[in-house]
Image (cartoon, rainbow, N blue to C red):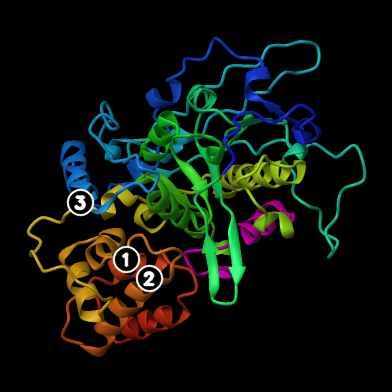
Amino acid sequence: MSSDSQPSDGSPVSSTGAVHASDAPQDDTKSPSRHLRREFTTSKLLSALPVESDDQLVSSTNAVVRNTFQDTTGAAALVTSQNTTGISDPQKETLLGNSVANSPDDTPGGKKPTPRTLGRSRTVPYITSKPEPRQHVPPQKSASMSQVGQKLYTYKDYAPVPIVKYVTTVEEANELVERLEGPLGFDLEWPVTFHQSGVTEFPTALVQFCDSNTILLIHVSRMKVFPEKVKEVIENPRVTKLGAMIRGDGKKLYRDFGILARGLVELGAFAGQMDRAFATAYPRGIVALARIVDFYLKKELRKGDVRTSDWSRPLSPEQIQYAADDSHCALMAYESILSVNKGLVETLDAGSFTRDLAQEVVEPPGAVTRSQKTSLGASSAYDLWSQGYGLLGICIKLGCDKTPGNDAEKEIVQNIVRTIVRDPRLPFDMVKLRRLVDTQPGMTAAYDSLGLMERQGRGKN
C-alpha cells in the first residue's frame, strides 16, 4: 500500500464535490465528543435480549479476543475497558433518540444552520411517531438514467446537499468523526482479486460514515494505524450504524483490525419489522441495499467496474461518488422506512435487526469447557450454540473466525439447523434459531427447514 498521506495536487477529488478535510471550514461550536454524549441508540430495543453489564462484557470480551486475535499489522487492537468507559447500559436507550430534526447546511442569503435537537427518548420499546420525510431537490439538469430507464441514485439530489470530506490522515479522521451526529450511514470498501481458484480479499481500505450534513470517507489504507476515535465510534453501541448485510462489514473489521462492531442495524430486517408491504415483498432478514433503495427511494445504485476497483490507491472521482452514494443512501432509506409507520404503534423485535459482535464473543455463563475443535462438525456447532455462544464466538471456538468471506459461518449455521432437523429430541428455541439464520444471506434451504419444523410444532422449548 502507498505510504502517501495526502492526495497530489490536481487530484480529481474536487470534481466530485469532495473537499479535503484540512481545507473544509470547521465548526467550532460543535463539541468534538458530542456524539458520545448523545443518546442516539437502538439499544433500548434490545430489552428482550439478555445483555451482560458493561464490566462483564468488557472482561469477557478481553479474555476471548486476547487469546484469539493477533493484529496482522503488528499492532493488537483489543477491546479494553477504556473503550467502553462511561457507556451506559445499552438497554436504557431508544432507537428514536437517533432521529434528529433535519437542519439545513449553508443556505442562500448567508443564514446560519439551524441547530438540530435530539428526539425525545421513549420509555417503551415502540416506535410511535413519524419523522418528517427529507426534502427532495428536483435536478437542474436532465436526470442521469440507468440502462433500464430508472434514475441513478446520487446524494446531490437531497437537501441539504452533504459535504463530502475525503480524509487520508489519522489526525483528521479522529477529529472529524467526532463531529458526526447519528444515526450514521455506514459502509466499507476493500480491493478484491478474482482468479480461477476463487476470490482473494485484501484489508479494509475505506470506511464510510454519513450523517445529515457530512459524508466522511476515511481512507484507512493510506494511514499507518487505524484511527482510535473511528474505532470507538464503531464499537459504541449507542451510535447506530445503518447498512445492508452490515454484519459482514463488522466481521471484516474484526478480521482486519480486531474491532468488535456494535450498534449495527440491518436495514432489510428493520424494514421488515416496520413495513408490512416490504415484509411481504422480502420475507428474509437480509436484503441487498440496491433492492432497499429501489423499494423506498425508487432509484438505482451505481454499480459497474468501480465496485471492484483498487480501493487502496488514491480515490478517483468515480470511486468517491460511488462510496459517498453507498453510505448516504443507507441513511435516506432509514428515514424513509421510519416515515412509513404513520403513527401506528408497532412492537419491534430488536434482536431480529440489530447486530452486536461484542456480545457474540461473550463466554456464556456455565459454559462447558471443551477441547479445541478443528472442524466445523454439526454436533460441535450445535453444542456450542445450545450453550449460548454467539456465532462469532462459535467461529472462534472452531478456529474459523479469520476465514475470509461468509462460507465458514454459513456452514456453521447450516450444520446447526441440520442437527436439529435430524434429531427431534434436541431442545431449541425457534425464535433464537431464526435470528441465527437471519445473519446469513442465501439460506433458502435453512428457511425451508424452519418452516417445516414450525408446522410440526417444534421449537417451543
User: Pointer 2: what residue?
Assistant: 408
Nearest the viewer among 48 and 434 is 434
Name the side, left or right, on which 12 lies relative to 209. right
Q: Residues within 10 Å of mark 3 (few under 14, many from 20)?
A: few
Disc on res. 67? 3
The residues bearing labels 3 and 2 have C-alpha atoms spaced at a distance of 20 Å
Q: Is residue 289 visible?
A: yes
The structure residue drawn at horizontal position 29% and vertical position 36%, both measured from the top left corner, is 92
Residue 375's x, y, as percent?
26, 76
User: Pointer 1: what residue?
Assistant: 400
Q: Is residue 48 visible?
A: no
Quadrant for the N terminus in the image: top right
Query: Callout 1: helix, strand or loop?
Result: loop
Q: Are marks 1 and 2 in contact (CB under 8 Å)?
A: yes
The residues colored magenta run: 280-304
The structure residue drawn at horizontal position 47% and vertical position 79%, both measured from the top left corner, is 444
Query: Callout 2: helix, strand or loop?
Result: helix
Q: Residues within 10 Å of mark 2 (few under 14, many from 20)?
A: some
Residue 224's x, y, as percent?
47, 34
Name the side, left or right, on which 51 lies relative to 298. left
Within the image, what quadrant is residue 161 found in? top right
Q: Kindly identify the amino acid type of the residue bearing the numbered disc 1.
A: Cys
The first of marks 3 and 2 along the sequence is 3
Name the side, left or right, on which 299 lies relative to 340. right
The structure residue drawn at horizontal position 61% and vertical position 14%, both measured from the top left corner, is 26
Q: Is residue 85 above or below residue 363?
A: above
Nearest the viewer among 221 and 153 is 221
The first of marks 1 and 2 along the sequence is 1
Residue 281 part of the magenta-drawn span: yes
Query: Callout 3: helix, strand or loop?
Result: helix
Quadrant for the C terminus in the image: bottom left
